[in-house]
Amino acid sequence: MNTAVSVRIPDALVQQLDNMAKTTDKSRSFHIQKALEAYLEEQADLQIAFDRLHDTSDQIISLEEMRMEINV
């Protein structure tokens, strides 16, 4: 199922979107959906990174220890 969503986008960004749609022969909706998917995935990855950064039980090793572990 698809749901229609209304957003306000600056004219300059719409122009870029229209140019991309014309160049690729894909719809505005296609490009907006792909951009939103990429953004949400990036945000999820960022949240994982922040969670790991603040995880006090996560072991911290030095660069030298890491190199020895991977035999570099």
Image (spheres, rainbow, N blue to C red):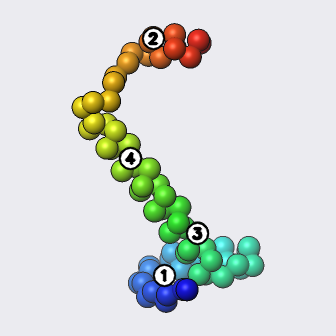
Residue 8, given in percent of the width and then of the height, sits at: 41, 84
User: Which element type, helix, strand or loop, lies under badge 3?
Assistant: helix
Instruction: Give the left or right position of residue 43, taking residue 18 as reference.
Output: left
Of callouts 2 and 3, the N-terminal one: 3
Q: Name the residue under label 2.
A: 64
Q: Mark 3 points at which residue?
A: 34
Question: Could you tell me which residue is drawn at 47 percent across and 55 percent down?
Answer: 42
Instruction: Give the left or right position of residue 37, taking residue 43 as reference.
Output: right
Of callouts 4 and 3, the N-terminal one: 3
Please name the amino acid that badge 2 sits on. Answer: Glu
Q: Name the residue under label 1.
A: 11
Please name the amino acid that badge 4 sits on. Answer: Ile
Above or below, 35 relative to 52: below
Give how far apart the Cα atoms at labels 1 and 3 are: 20 Å
Q: Quadrant of residue 1?
A: bottom right
Residue 17, given in percent of the width and then of the height, sits at: 59, 76
Of callouts 1 and 3, the N-terminal one: 1
The crowd level at tag 2 (other Cα within 10 Å; few <14, some 14-19, many 20+) is few
Above or below, 52 relative to 57: below
The crowd level at tag 4 (other Cα within 10 Å; few <14, some 14-19, many 20+) is few
Of callouts 4 and 1, the N-terminal one: 1
Q: Mark 4 points at which residue?
A: 48
Instruction: Give the left or right position of residue 21, taking residue 72 as reference.
Output: right
Tag in front: 1 or 3: 3
Please name the amino acid that badge 3 sits on. Answer: Lys
Tag in front: 2 or 4: 4
User: Which element type, helix, strand or loop, lies under badge 4?
Assistant: helix
Of callouts 1 and 2, the N-terminal one: 1
